[in-house]
Image: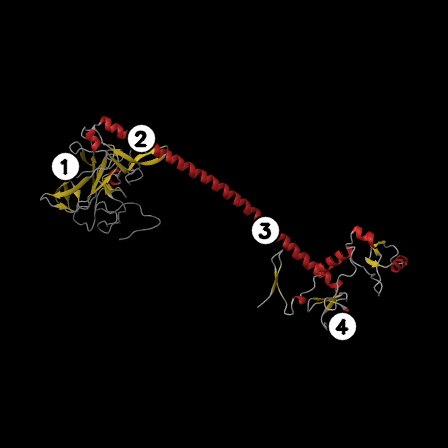
Amino acid sequence: GVWVVWCPECGYEAAVPPGGVECFPLNYVLQKQLVLEALNSSFTTVYCDLCHDDVVAEERCDTCPVNLCRLCSHAHTRQRRTTHHTVISLQEARSLGIREVAHTLVCATHGEGEVGWWCRGCHEPLCAACLATLHRGHPTVTVDQAAPQARKKLTALLDQASSRMNYLLSTVEDLSGAATRVQQRGRVVSDQVNAFIDDYIMALEEHRHTLLRQTLLSEQVRGWMRWERLALLREHRAGKVRGHRIQGVIADTPADPSNSRLKPLCDVTNLTVGSKASALVVARDIDGQPVTHGGEEISASILAIDGTTLRCGCSVRDREDGSYEVIFCPPLPTAATLHITIQGVHVQGSPLEIGITSMPMGVSGVTAGDGNREASLGGRRHTGVFHCCTFCSSGGDKTATCACGATMPGGYLGCGHNHTGHPGQKHWSCCAQTNPSGPCTRPPSQYYQVTL
């Protein structure tokens, strides 16, 4: 229900007063501009500013400035106050360009009265008629008195606007620079992505040719019987090509159970119930040569003397290099055998006899290799595993460590069998304690303390 006038230059919206567009305050700046355009136009009839009648002006005082008829011009130059003023013809003044007018503040209410006062209560300029009638009794001052204060306020506002404008321009410049940097960085990353993908594609093409050459070589050298067993192992690591890790190998030499071998990685003749044990299966082909890839179906199980299968959580981890790690935890104290088969045929060393003993007396709920079980006699909880060495318990992880402080050549941070510093027997990885049921002897942490 409110009408507004929209400025096409700055976008400002001014609400129209209830009386309509005619009630907008007079724009004196625009009014002065319109008067100057009329004075400079040769088609405008200009009247003398000093005569009461409509007498055409022919001359103009460039000092006052006022438009004068011939009679008033003669009197203007003879008076003592204005004798030094410069009076020129109106035509000459127009050619030089008229830039000032004598009467610009005209009352918007009465049309002809010159504005000379300012109403502080209504914030409006007043003529003599307005002062005597409409604004009688209102707090007023002369225009000369109000102008300095208004000028001071406008100057402060302009200074603030100038400061904000400089800040906005600086911000826009920073944003433009940031946008340029983002675009440049985007182009750099895009080039890196394209270069990486192009190089990766070249690595894949090179690996493709390598696999195809291996396939043809296997057909020519191994013969047609091996050709029938040829297979592609998609998920197996094939090393690096042009710096990229590539998967996929050709399996042309299947493992032969009679030549493959089972090797225990710890002392399996005296295992403790619940302890973690491991063994290694090394695959070899029919010629006794090592198989350099994984993918074989290795079956592992533990059978008691009476032939029943023990539930020991037997698992086989394919190392993808022709070897397989078998991990199991004996559940019961009994004599048993570890059975390892490839395609249903036992490998060398299988079945492997293992001895399983119960926990020592006085141990309540202690399981070797389980760092989350409690030690006996109210001792501190172990946080590691009870193992023969770090190499076996971690599956060959070079970054695994042990509290015994021993290390192995080749960058291994943990201990290994027969290497310097190894305790020579099973021990806890958290404190190097060799007693499976003893409390943890690691130093108390300054950050936390576990109590049982």
**SS under mark 4:** helix
Pointer 1 and pointer 3: residues touching (CB < 8 Å)? Answer: no
Q: Which residue is mark 4?
A: 132
Q: Amino acid at mark 4?
A: Ala
Which of disc 1 and disc 2 is earlier in sequence?
Answer: 2
Q: Which residue is mark 2?
A: 210
Left or right, 67 with respect to 437, comes to right
Q: Which residue is mark 1?
A: 345
Q: Position of residue 406 (x, y in %)?
A: 28, 36
Q: Which residue is mark 3?
A: 168
Residue toward you, 45 or 86? 45
Mark 2 burial class by Cα count in 10 Å: few <14, some 14-19, many 20+:
few
Q: Position of residue 354 (x, y in %)?
A: 14, 40
Q: Position of residue 175 (x, y in %)?
A: 54, 47
Which of disc 4 and disc 2 is earlier in sequence?
Answer: 4
20 w.r.t. 157: above or below = below
Between marks 2 and 1, how big is the CA–CA gap? 33 Å
Q: Amino acid at mark 2?
A: Thr
Q: Quadrant of residue 78?
A: bottom right
**SS under mark 3:** helix
Which of disc 2 and disc 3 is earlier in sequence?
Answer: 3
